[in-house]
Image (spheres, grey):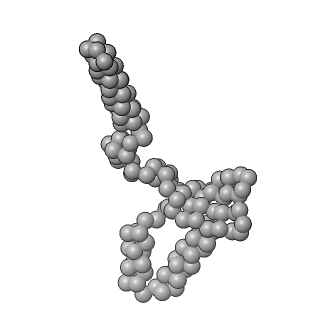
């Protein structure tokens, strides 16, 4: 092998390395800026690392399922079969745990056990509708 063939091989290897390095850096920057990166999602306004997740799953038989999904702080009830996916409804949380705990404490202090039982049964009816 002569000296010019070795030089040509080294130039080609260096050029190929530069192209591959540039391509890798481009892919890295694209992923950071496109929102597919978990770090980007956390920086973009406090969105959780998982913008969509399955909270609950219930099988209703072969090929029939119901899912409770959370997508960007909203909850959805989805029905899925082997051939289609249907939106069954939105889950709206009207009361938070602190409010419910305060209502329980107020009812207990008032001594109105009947009011507490009514509130509890109405809450159970709301949950059973879902």
User: Is 63 placed left or right of 104 in the picture?
Assistant: right
In the image, residue 43 above or below residue 101? above
In the image, residue 47 above or below residue 10? below
User: Is 9 placed left or right of 67 in the picture?
Assistant: left
Q: Residue at x 63, y 63 (%)?
A: 66
Among the 4 quarters of the image, the one containing residue 7: top left
Q: Quadrant of the N terminus?
A: top left
User: Is 54 placed left or right of 38 in the picture?
Assistant: right
Furthest toward the top, the residue is: 4
> Residue 3: image x %, image y %?
26, 14
Q: Is residue 8 visible?
A: no
In the image, residue 61 above or below residue 2? below
> Residue 56: image x %, image y %?
54, 65
> Residue 109: image x %, image y %?
37, 84
Q: Judge by depth and name the residue closer to the eye, 4 or 112.
A: 4
Among the 4 quarters of the image, the one containing residue 11: top left
Q: Residue at x 69, y 68 (%)?
A: 60
User: Is 11 placed left or right of 75 in the picture?
Assistant: left
Q: Is residue 101 visible?
A: yes
């Amino acid at each position: 092998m002569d000296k010019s063939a070795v030089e040509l091989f080294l130039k080609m290897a260096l050029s190929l390395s530069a192209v591959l390095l540039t391509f890798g850096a481009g892919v890295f920057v694209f992923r950071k800026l496109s929102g597919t990166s978990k770090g980007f999602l956390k920086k973009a306004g406090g969105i959780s690392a998982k913008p969509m997740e399955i909270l609950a799953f219930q099988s209703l038989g072969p090929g029939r399922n119901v899912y409770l999904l959370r997508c960007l702080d909203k909850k959805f009830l989805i029905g899925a079969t082997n051939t289609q996916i249907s939106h069954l409804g939105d889950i709206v949380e009207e009361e938070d745990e602190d409010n419910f705990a305060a209502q329980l404490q107020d009812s207990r202090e008032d001594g109105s056990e009947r009011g507490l039982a009514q509130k509890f049964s109405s809450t159970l009816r709301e949950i059973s509708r879902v």
